Image (cartoon, coloured by chain):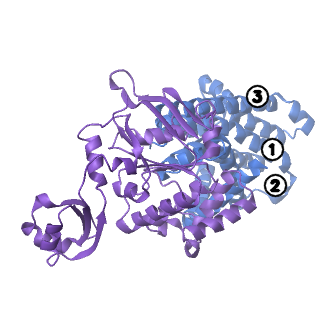
Chain colours: A blue, B purple
Amino acid sequence: MRNLKLLGAEIVKIMGDLKAYWFNYLFGNLNVFFLFLGIFYAFQKSNGTAIDTFNLLIGLMIWYYGVHAIDLIAIIIEEEAEEGTLEQIFVTRSSFIKVLFNRIMSQIIFDTIKGVFVFVLCVITFKIPFSFIKSINWLWTLIIFFLTLSGLYGIGYAVAGLSIIYKKTTAVAGTCSNLLLFFTGIIIDLDKLPKAFIYLSKVLPLHWGMNTLNDLIRNDFQLFKIVRSSNFIYLIISCLFWILFGVFIFKICEEKARIKGTLNQY
Amino acid sequence: MLKISNISKEFGKNNKKVQALNHINLQVDKGEIVCILGHNGAGKTTLIKCISGLIIPTSGEITIDSESVIKNSNIPKNKVGAVLEGSRNIYYYLTPRENLKYFGLLNNLSKREIEERTEYYLNLFDLKNRENDMVKQFSRGMQQKVAIMVALMKEPDILLLDEPTLGLDIISSSIVKNIIKELSEKSNKTIMITTHDVRLIENLDSRVVFMKEGRLVKDDYLSNLKNIIGQEDTYELVITEQSFKRQMNELIETDYQVIDNRENLIIINTTSKKWIAQNIDSLDIININKKEYDFEAIYRRILEEGAINEKP
């Protein structure tokens, strides 16, 4: 019930934001579309099938929303500090970590609406056959998609914790963004990369999320086989690890900022 | 009851250590209004932030109704409302109604509580006719009103106002002063105000705590403080800047003191009736107030010329 109230609060805020800055939001969508379009033409395989194209599109969507997941919480904190509302949130009856969680949830709802628009535009432009789109197990595709994102939000909490202490962490988020795009197998096959990157990618939930989606879509695994697969199990472990690690780092940083008295400094 | 026991706060490390609070002791009863006065860097904001749980003190204890603010961060979250200095405190791209709803939900209020309190405060603060306008379109005084409304939404036992009139023009400042006065008269809330604005303190006629370099140097009621300096009657004159500049060379400087200069208006204090009589025709006087005392003189005497009854 309390979480629903917090989610309601965030929707009030996001609607106000949308009302005030609708023009920017409109072009935000086009921005994503052109980004995907550019990457698609650069990295599509010449002899690729509809599955290849779809996998690239899904990979790009996970990457885009994943990058957003990693820097979103840090951006929220930076913006709140800049706007001078961060401390006001801290003195409300809600825990800050829960407020952030519900801000993420509202953002996911909002991003999903935006994402559907971008996705449809891409499907038409990339000429993915409708029969193929229809044949996909969407429920499980979305479960794996959001599960992967949850792990990335865990990394986001850790980055946000650092932003409470160091104030500007866009460079950290940028590093994560490039790392996720080029070294997790979304647009470049992992076997083309040095071994160090392969090991690194295995630490991140995105790698396991992409593998599980491959199992589901490309390899046509049945659900019972998916949930027993090592890719799915590693995805769960990786997500749990990053969520716990992220929240832990965030709490430590929050406490440190309260001791240093730098919570609202920008 | 708010009890601050032996609170100290140090910032920085090694050679760069700053003692922001130095063994502060203070007790504030329910419904009491306390103004905290001091120069920049005296520790006023640090004290307010310690009470609201935003800063953890190095040592000492703060309790609200015998419950520790330091050990349990939910205590200030439940019992303290704050308007903090240097912060907007509210979202400028939302309307007052949306801000109240947002922070009402964050404070776990029910839909009915939010609606009832929103109506009550919009009427009390005279913002009903602007309830659906974005806050960024408001004057600073009106924005400050919305920030105070947000702090009041959860009906806190203790309201902390950090420099509520800072940066406001004379009219906005007077709006906020009237609001605080009204709150102090109508509600039974403990209100703590940090300020540089001696006229706000004069207006409230409450208990005043003086802070200097992290220490509490004087804690007394305004009525008692008036006796510190045996004073003649003081007159406060509001005059136009134009007439003041025109006559400046003719005025005897020792007979008056400029205390404010904003928006083409100058406020001066004088104890000399003769000076007023001599200049009443040449200065465009908008208003004259007779004050029983000059609080600015008390402030200077305590904080600049040396503490009186300084507490260890």
Mark 3 neighbour class, 10 Å CA radius: few under 14, some 14 to 19, many 20 or more? some
Camera-nearest residue between B304 and B263: B304
**Which secondary structure lies at badge 3?**
helix
Instruction: Confirm whether residue A18 shows in the render.
Output: no
How far apart are the alpha carbons under marks 2 and 1? 17 Å
Write down the chain letter for disc 1: A
Please name which of the two marks, 2 or 3, marks the residue nearer to the observer.
3
Q: Position of residue A81 (x, y in %)?
A: 50, 47
Q: Which residue is mark 1?
A: A143
Q: Position of residue A174 (x, y in %)?
A: 52, 40
**Which secondary structure lies at badge 2?**
helix
The image quadrant that residue B53 belongs to is top right
**Rendered residue at 15%/79% (across/down):** B281
Please name which of the two marks, 2 or 1, marks the residue nearer to the observer.
1
Residue type beneath disc 2: Ile
Mark 2 neighbour class, 10 Å CA radius: few under 14, some 14 to 19, many 20 or more? some
Q: Which residue is mark 2?
A: A133
Q: Which residue is mark 3?
A: A237
Residue type beneath disc 1: Ile
**Rendered residue at 23%/75% (across/down):** B285
Residue type beneath disc 3: Ile
Instruction: Confirm whether residue A247 shows in the render.
Output: yes
How far apart are the alpha carbons under marks 3 and 1? 15 Å
Q: Is residue A118 left or right of residue B185?
A: right
Camera-nearest residue between A219 and B273: B273
**Rendered residue at 49%/53% (across/down):** A83
Which comes before the other along the chain, label 3 or label 1? Answer: 1
Q: Position of residue B176 (x, y in %)?
A: 45, 62
The quadrant of the image that shows the N terminus of chain B is: top right
**Which secondary structure lies at badge 1?**
helix
Residue furthest left as drawn: B249
The image quadrant that residue B109 belongs to is bottom right
